[in-house]
Amino acid sequence: MAPVVVAEDVHERYGDTVALDGVSLAVEAGEVFALIGPNGAGKTTLTRCLTGTRTPDGGRVELLGDPPADAAKERLGLLPQDFDPPDRLTARELVAYYAGLYDDARDPADLLRTVGMDPAVDTWYGDLSGGEQRRTCVAASLANDPDVLFVDEPTTGIDPAGRRALWDVFEDLADAGTTVFLTTHYMAEAERLADRVGLLADGALVATGTPADLIADYGGEQYLAVETDADAASLPDLGYEVTRAGDELRVVGVPPEAIGDVAAELDANGVPFDALSWTEPDLEDVYLRLAEDPSAAETDDVEVVA
Ligand SMILES: Nc1ncnc2c1ncn2[C@@H]1O[C@H](COP(=O)(O)OP(=O)(O)OP(=O)(O)O)[C@@H](O)[C@H]1O
């Protein structure tokens, strides 16, 4: 099946600022693709180019098999980062307005319930809290039950419980076959929701892959942190590399089942410690490594769209 979203060597600039410097990617039907990257990396610009709200200076973009301007709008859901609806519509009126634009719309009350807006549906948008406003916007973006959904930082400003509730909403959509193109600064969100993650830095896609592959390639090793003043040299026979980081020694590469052995070795060597904590790498480690040094990415981690 042809990809639903295609970018091929996309370039875009604002005056002298290069926002996108040759981005290529393809998102398959039913896939959840998360775009991550530092502020100013070009994520919103790429989302705009993919959805037809900006025409790139160079390259090719395809949405649902057509140039974005010609893509079937009734199949598309879009929540821009800067979506700013009128203050004096209630949450209910706002979602009903968007539902009214389509023949086969979802029930606004049901949508508002889904995003956890039950108690505040009759409050003016301008009087809602930031998190409630964002939830309402998410509900509005789902009004036409889209086949492809672009959401640019959908959970920013939403409390942790509400964020998890929205993750369930996006997961349900993905399970039902909706293609989701998500932009986020929350690595836990990308790790939980995405089939594949793309890391954008300085307008270039540095790496793409499943969260597990990216973590395996760039996350670094699991380690046991030992809170101690002792010197690394006081643990000569551990069989693991030991490095100092702040007030802890890190015993690198220790699998969870070997924590007891390391603790026994600490005792045997008379090394006093206050605490032990085991850490495994996650997507945040990948982000921190590649955003800081994009050249660390292997070139075959960036896909080329034929
Ligand atoms: N309308 C504009 N005029 C001039 N420069 C712009 C404009 N919009 C974006 N830029 C610049 O283009 C670059 C990419 O911006 P973009 O908003 O796409 O980044 P982003 O990755 O979405 O950032 P954030 O994570 O902060 O939302 C930045 O350097 C930004 O300053």
Image (cartoon, rainbow, N blue to C red):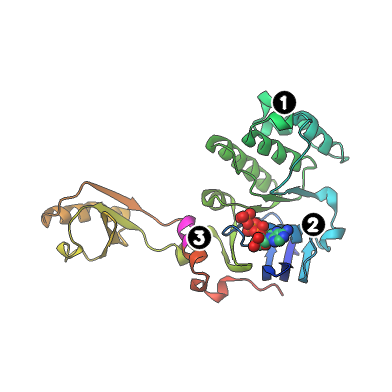
Q: Are marks 3 and 2 in contact (CB under 8 Å)?
A: no
Q: In the depicted view, which residue is nearer to us: 6 or 186?
A: 186
| Magenta stretch secondary structure, dominant | helix
Q: Which residues are magenta?
A: 283-288
Mark 1: amino acid: Thr
The part of the image, by quadrant, that contains residue 17 is bottom right
Q: Quadrant of residue 123?
A: top right
Other residues around mark 1 within 10 Å, as few (<14) / some (14–19) / many (≥20): some
Which residue is label 1 attached to? 123
Q: Depth-wise, is mark 1 or mark 3 nearer the camera?
A: 1
Position in image of residue 55 (x %, y %): 80, 64
Residue 264 image position (x, y, % from top left): 17, 53
Q: Does any portion of residue 28 appear in the rendered image?
A: no
Q: For residue 252, which numbered disc appears in the image?
A: none
Q: Which residue is mark 3?
A: 287
- On the image, numbered disc 2 is attached to which residue? 53
| Element class at badge 2 | loop
Image quadrant, ligand 1: bottom right
Mark 2: which amino acid? Thr
Indicate the secondary structure of the residue bearing disc 3: helix
- Is 168 in the magenta? no
Horizontal relation, residue 146 to residue 268: left or right: right
In this rendering, is residue 69 above or below 88? below
